[in-house]
Image (cartoon, rainbow, N blue to C red):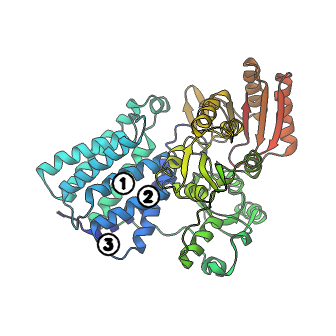
Amino acid sequence: MRHTIDGAAFCRMILSASASIEMNKQRVNELNVFPVPDGDTGTNMSMTLGAAAADLRKADAPQLGKAADITASALLRGARGNSGVILSLLFRGFSKALKGLEEASGIELARALTSGVESAYNAVMKPAEGTILTVSRVTAAKATEAAQENDDIEHVLSVAIEAAKAALPQTTEQNPVLKKAGVVDAGAVGFLVILEGMMASLQGNDVIVDALSDTPATKEQADFSEFATEDITFGYCTEFIVSRENEKDPNLLRSFLSELGDSLVLVDDEEIIKVHVHTNNPGVAIEEALTYGSLVTVKVENMRLQHTEKVLSAEEMPEKIAEPSKKYGVVSVCCGDGIATAFRDLGADQIVSGGQTMNPSTEDILKAIHATPAEIVLVLPNNKNIIMAAEQTIPLAKKQVVVIPSKTIPQGITALLNFDPDCEVEENVEHMTQSLDTVTTMQITYAARNSDFDGHAIQEGDYLALYGNGLFGNGPDLSVLLKDLAIKVASEEKSFINIFYGDTVTEEEATQAGAIFQSQCPEADVNILNGGQPVYYYLISAE
């Protein structure tokens, strides 16, 4: 049994953990409470830890304390979603405990786990039980007890893993939402998967993941300085594997995707269809793929952002920080050309592409903040799973940053409408934050899997209607759900209704949706806008 680890062993453990969560991310994603296609906890944790793995691969044999510091720094900037931010906080404390060390035994590992838990709990304003925080706390406590009996690091880590496994089923009982859905906490499962990946490396069985695409890189992908970022025609590298669950011909999917983008590679056998395509509409590609079966893996990367980062890295250019030319600036997170235009029209300086299924990293948001020519930058996350990542930019930014905790696109728009450039920052924060509760958000998407939630028998492919924070209804008939939502809005006597329709909805269909709301709310002002957002057919606000 191994007694200690050094920097090299720690690096291997993180690389193995990164591969482990990458391999299991879909299993983690599927634990999402609602069966909507945004169960991205596994994806966020994988991408967050992947940022650390990438930096460690470039490091030159760092000693243990340095390797832990590299990991924590990369996780902080690469954190995506709430789960990714909490993971980064755990490793931030982990790094503090290992600072300056060349080796660590079981006692140091237990201290590092405890320090990580303290760091995470101190940073989260209202820690909830039955989450990754609970499981990590129990794990650290058991690790500390084990280290007093046997200082071997392998022994302590094995006890920690068993403690996490034992604590995991309890999350269902501790968290009312999880109990209602009958699932364990997704972030806690991801944490366990990471610990198991670290143990596999410690025992000489490092987890390794092969890249999805076997396609050799094109010249444009390899020689980044020969063309400009804006010359990239199709911005998202979209890769996925979908199960073959019906008799649909994969060649139909090939034809569909060839019209949607380029660099298409499609390989199929009797069980799966494996796809690589460059497109500006990853949501459309994924939605079409779902007609063949359920997704096994999915990865969407912003190639324009990647290209810019690689060119800057190759030229060793420091990040540009825009000189302030005004007091206030605004950064908004959103997805969809129409929605982005609406935010720009209302005064947003920078748009960070992201939202459901595509949470931006802390680094993505930080770059937009630095590109904003203002003394004070207001950030609108517009998604509850992006708020924590946005808040992590506050100590990193070289400008004053204020995060307005908008959880939806309509809330973000309302907040921006309540911004006054002539007011002091405290007054703006108060007005903008208070305005968030004045708007009701409705969303219509589809069920990514079969589910039985809160009395709703949900079938994969059903339309799902969300009202505020809850599931409103589901079924195969979209017009029925729209009418039910309109009746609900009418009963609350709302005066202004905005309907943003998504990238798969035609103008005619959107007009029909608007007519349904107008018929039920004849006194209301109903506006129809082409949002262009993926995943969600309609985003509807009512005030």
Q: CA distance from mark 3 to mark 1?
A: 17 Å
Q: Amino acid at mark 1?
A: Arg
Q: Earlier in the sequence, mark 3 or mark 1?
A: 3
Is residue 168 visible in the rendered structure shown here?
no
Quadrant where the image shows the N terminus: bottom left
Secondary structure beneath dot 1 equals: helix
Task: Check the image and report above or below for 229 versus 96.
Answer: below
Q: Is residue 437 visible?
A: yes
| Circle number at residue 75 | 2
Residue depicted at 21% across the width and 66% down the height: 103
What amino acid type is highlighted by mark number 2?
Leu
Placement of the C terminus among the 4 image quadrants = top right
Q: In terms of secondary structure, where does tag 2 sit? A: helix
Q: Determine whether label 3 and label 1 are within 8 Å by CB.
A: no
Mark 2 or mark 1: name the one nearer the start of the chain.
2
Dot 3 crowding, Cα within 10 Å, few <14, some 14–19, many 20+: some
Q: Residues within 10 Å of mark 2 (few under 14, many from 20)?
A: many
In the rendered image, the vertical position of residue 43 relative to residue 128, given as above or below = below
Residue 92 bears which disc, if any? 1
Q: Earlier in the sequence, mark 3 or mark 2?
A: 3
Q: Nearer the viewer, residue 312 or 355?
A: 312
What separation in Å lies between label 3 and label 2 (alpha carbons)?
Answer: 17 Å
| Point 42% across, 66% down: residue | 53
Pointers 2 and 1 in contact (C-beta within 8 Å): yes
Q: Position of residue 143 (x, y in %)?
A: 22, 48
Disc 2 versus disc 1: distance between alpha carbons? 8 Å
> As shown in the figure, which amino acid type bears the numbered disc 3?
Pro
- Relative image position of residue 346 (x, y in whole percent): 75, 44
Whether residue 238 sits left or right of residue 366 in the image: it is right
